Amino acid sequence: MKTLSENRVFDGVQGVYVHPSVTCGCEMTFALYLPPEAAHSKVPLLWYLSGLTCTHENAMTKAGMQKYAAELGMAVCFPDTSPRGADVADDKAFDLGQGAGFYVDASQAPWDPHFRMWSYVTGELPRLIGDHFPVEMDRQSITGHSMGGHGALTVAMRQAERFASVSAFAPIANPVASDWGRKQFTAYLGNDEADWAAHDSSLLMRDHGFDGPVLIDQGTSDQFLDLLRPETLAEAMAARRQDGVFRFQKGYDHSYFFMATFMEAHMAFHADALDL
Ligand SMILES: N[C@@H](CCC(=O)N[C@@H](CSC=O)C(=O)NCC(=O)O)C(=O)O
């Protein structure tokens, strides 16, 4: 692993690191914020999974998480959203290929050699972080935006033992019934829709939910509302009687201005679940 940069911010360190990924078969970059406490003891870890077109950098620079992470004593990890490189398959569309890994392991050509974001964020990257940084791997929570909200919810519901809490900003909430999902799952996973269900947060919520608190924020002026299908997840939470809150926030769109506005509340929610 190589350090690309380390900057002091709110008395902690915002680092960016690159490592050869066995899972993705290419170099992967991630960012990790360590709060001041991490200089002398291990700290809990919050994952932030980003959306379409993002790298590790968007949330690191625009979500305003470092101030709250420093105050709460929490590390934050920002993975990339896909494998990258000249040898990695891509597509002209912004919502397929590089920058659009959808947190699944592809089984179809030409994506299958590298597009293994499920295994990367659930296996290889957590192991690497736990081995190299002062984080408490038995105290983790997860959040994300849009495609990353979909990732956060599906990872949390399928690896419930790993996470104290899950939240999401404007998640792609029902990808099996949306053009943000059907196109990508067909490309990455193939035509058998039975293989898609494990990556749909509304279906997972209906089937088994999450054993912990859930917080979802969705802007009412989001330009992608019809693709996100928030009502399907809200209905599934109600049907499941899930411990959680689903909030429609009046006038907010899909941008990082929305995340920055509600980030403090999300981080306080996770801090509470992590007993901070
Ligand atoms: N270029 C696209 C819009 C892409 C976009 O809005 N991406 C969002 C995530 S959307 C769902 O996953 C994002 O977070 N972008 C990065 C940012 O820094 O804002 C279009 O033209 O429609």
Image (spheres, rainbow, N blue to C red):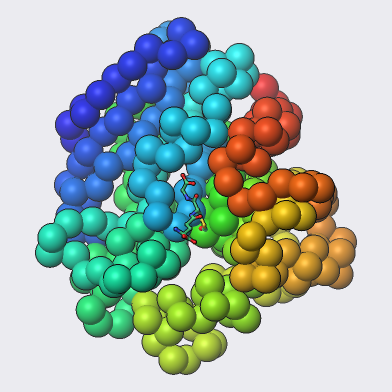
Quadrant location of the N terminus? top left
Does 234 appear above or below 197?
A: above
Does 203 appear above or below 26?
A: below
Residue depicted at x 22% and y 70%: 89
Q: Position of residue 51 (x, y in %)?
A: 48, 54
Left or right, residue 219 beside residue 172: right
Residue depicted at x 43% and y 76%: 184
Does 119 appear above or below 72?
A: below
Residue 41 in sight:
no
Residue depicted at x 57% and y 56%: 146
Residue 261 in sight:
yes
Q: Position of residue 253 (x, y in %)?
A: 66, 50
Left or right, residue 166 beside residue 41: right
Q: Position of residue 19 (x, y in %)?
A: 20, 41
Residue 257 position by quadrant? top right
Identify which residue, 116 or 110, lies in the foreground. 110
Residue 83 position by quadrant? bottom left
Identify which residue, 249 or 241, lies in the foreground. 249
Residue 125 position by quadrant? top left
